[in-house]
Amino acid sequence: MAFIQELKARNETLFYFGFICLLFSILFLILTKTTTTQVYGVNAWYKPFKFAFSTLTFAWAMVWYCYYLPNFNIKIFNWSVIILLGYEIFYIAFQASKGQLSHYNVSTPFYSALFSLMALAATAVTLYTAYVGVLFFKYDFPNLPNHYLWAIRFGIIIFVIFSFEGFAMGSRLNHSVGALNDNSNWFIIGWSKTVGDLRVSHFIGMHALQVLPILTYYVFKNTKLAVVLSFVYLILALLTLIQALKGRPLIKVKNSKNEMRNTIKK
């Protein structure tokens, strides 16, 4: 509760946006258990759930970090995030309600335009986050532990790199390498168990924004260790990207239903 109260005190606007995303993610998760509409073999509501929850973690992380920045126009940042990412969640949820694709949907000029708007929204938020990262290099932060500061810097850098990895999926209209948008019944994340999945490195890299500062602040309380941890994390994300590009799943499960389906297609 102390953490929640501190978040609210640091940036009430973005805190409540994150809280709304949390409520929607809970709603979407309930819908995965109470509806049967599917897209590419999985319940249609898993995608809006993942995006709402991911937006929650992004929003609250930026609440925490932007508080440290001097002379930063937080109001413009807040509403940029709310409008741009709010549009993504709304459109993804709207398409899920109809059992239709949001991402990679170029079936009509209208859907192509909406898909392109999602790409522009994600790009704008990523570039704004990159600017925040530049400010963390520009200013001195004498009140922050040095290891924690470097973890924030590296977390933002890795986040930006692997946010832009989304273009690798968007340009192919496919998150799989070796199949067409393959999904597996793997808990909530749904990564493929049979072919390469570009979402793995995308997920790992983007969540460096939260993982590195938390681990460094609470566990690896040393600047050199923070730097080493950041490079190890970056290598992990890169290796999962290379693995996916080679058409190999993160964890291969033999004789799965997806593998049998893909074999039949071939």
Image: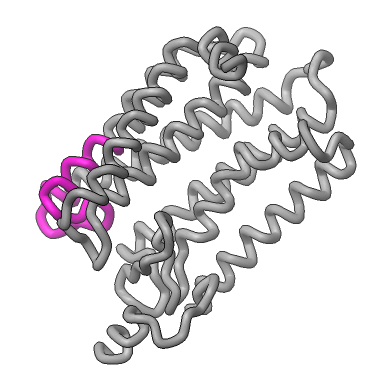
Residue 7: image x %, image y %?
55, 16
Q: Percent from the top left, x then y, of residue 206?
A: 54, 46
Horizontal and vertical percent position of residue 12: 46, 10
| Vertical placement of residue 75 versus 228, above or below | above
Q: Position of residue 38 (x, y in %)?
A: 19, 60
Residue pictured at 30% horizontal, 63% vertical: 173
Q: Is residue 153 visible?
A: no
> Which quarter of the figure is the C terminus placed in?
bottom left
Identify the image's colour scheme: rainbow, by chain, secondary structure or one colour. Answer: one colour
Residue 83 covered by magenta stretch? no
Which of the pair 180/17 is nearer the observer?
17
Q: Nearer the viewer, residue 16 or 172?
A: 16
Q: Is residue 65 visible?
A: yes
Q: Residue at point 42% right, 12% down?
A: 13
The residue drawn where x is 60% and y is 38% is 209
Residue at the (36%, 66%) spot, across then down: 185
- Does the segment drawn in magenta span residue 100? yes
The reply, left or right, for residue 67 in relation to residue 18 is right
Residue 62: quadrant of the picture: top right
Q: Which residues are magenta?
A: 88-112
In this rendering, would 32 be left or right of 18? left
The N terminus - image quarter? top right
Of 57 and 136, the residue lying toward us: 57
- 78 to the left or right of 60: left
Q: Is residue 146 above or below residue 195?
A: above
